[in-house]
Image (tube, grey):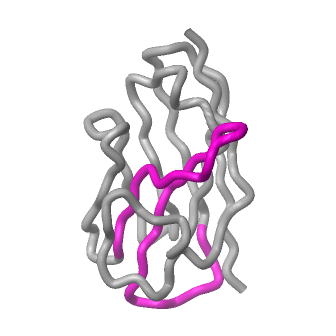
Amino acid sequence: QVQLVESGGGSVQSGGSLRLSCAASGYTHSSYCMGWFRQAPGQEREGVAAIDSDGSTSYADSVKGRFTISQDNAKNTLYLQMNSLKPEDTAMYYCAVDLLCTIVVAPPDPLSYNYWGQGTQVTVSS
């Protein structure tokens, strides 16, 4: 059973930083993509960043140069380092895994991802 558990969200002032973590378990696929997505109230879920099993990454234009996605395979953990945060980054952030993925696309498409975590809230105040 695939399980994804996010942590690291919180409240921060504009210009600040946060690092999100996603602990993954329950799958042994050698080829996959993992991604971070976000959803603000009243808006659709959007892709933020993704990484595949080879380490290739993709980012939404809105976060390029500010966010960095990475993974620690030994710890089965996905990270999202978020710098220079803006009020418009405020949203619930989710991690997800696509076990059929062979290459990341930019921005990652939520419809392609099979398994999701419960989310962690990020709030950026001006």
Tell me where residue 9 appears, x and y as whole percent: 64, 37
Picture residue at 42% right of the left edge, 41% below the top: 81
- Residue 99, placed above or below residue 95: below
Q: Quadrant of residue 63?
A: top left
Q: Position of residue 64 (x, y in %)?
A: 29, 40
- Which residue is situated farthest in the top direction here? 126
Give the residue drawn at x 65%, y 47%.
7
Q: Is residue 27 magenta?
A: yes
- In percent of the image, x 62 and y 41: which residue is there? 8
Instruction: State the residue in front, 12 or 62.
Output: 62
Q: Position of residue 97 (x, y in %)?
A: 53, 73
In the rendered structure, which segment of residues is drawn in magenta? 24-52
| Nearer-the-camera pick, 51 or 37 | 37
Name the quarter where the N terminus is drawn: bottom right
Is residue 23 magenta-colored? no
Q: Is 4 above or below relative to 58?
A: below
Q: Quadrant of the C terminus?
A: top right
- Residue 64 in the image: above or below residue 53: above
